[in-house]
Image (tube, rainbow, N blue to C red):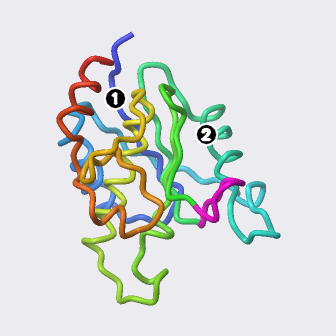
Amino acid sequence: MVLQKITLISFGDFDNFFLRSLSEKIYNEFSISIQIKEAHLDLSDFYNPMRRQYDANELLHYMEKQFAAEASKTIGLFNVDLFIPIFTYIFGQAFLGGRTGIASAYRLNNECYGIEADANLLLDRFAKELIHELGHTFGLIHCHVPDCVMRSGTYVEDIDQKNIMFCPSCKANLLKLD
């Protein structure tokens, strides 16, 4: 089956300009049609009061069950603090070689670190995270090239150091998987 589109589903309070800008950056890397949708979801079922965060594993499985579609990669866009049991927090997660991923802008905001807001930096960080998670859905694993978008990122500074593009090796692997 040939992939027809990437669907971004906004569950956060993201304005249209921000979403369009994200889709342009993603299109520049994948050259696949990007569809933007907005949806509403009661996130209380995913909230863990002990951690005061949202369970990314449960949210990802819900996204897969409710929103995934054939011939499409679907990424849920959130603005909440995500975790998985083995990490304090994560920026995003995806099914390796699957159809679905999630990403959150929450810890990508400068305000989270007591720094003045920077809309352009947030856009750049979020686009990198979305491209990274989409890379996983296409079957790419973490890369060891320091500036590749597929390099693992534990801290926001890691994301800042990456390019928004795949390194030549990851790009070649992506084309092989197509």
Instruction: Tell me if 15 is positioned left or right of 62 in this view.
Output: left
Tell me, yes or no, whether the two marked residues, 2 and 1, touch with CB atoms within 8 Å: no
Residue 72: x percent and y percent?
42, 26
**Quarter occupied by the C terminus:** top left
- Which residue was labeled with disc 1? 5
What's the residue at 32%, 54% (across, down)?
Answer: 128
Q: Amino acid at mark 2?
A: Met
Image spot of residue 49 (x, y percent): 81, 69
Write the start and end of the magenta stretch as one range.
81-89
Image coordinates of residue 154 in percent, x first then y, are 47, 61
Label 1: few (<14), some (14–19) or many (≥20) C-alpha neighbours in 10 Å: some
Disc 2: which residue: 63
Instruction: Give the left or right position of residue 147, taking residue 132 as reference.
Output: left
Query: Mark 2 and mark 1: span between their CA atoms?
Result: 17 Å
The front one of 20 and 147 is 147
Mark toward the start of the polypeptide (2 vs 1): 1
The answer to which image quadrant residue 161 occupies is bottom left
Q: Nearer the viewer, residue 92 or 168?
A: 168
Residue 140 x, y percent position in the rendering: 39, 31
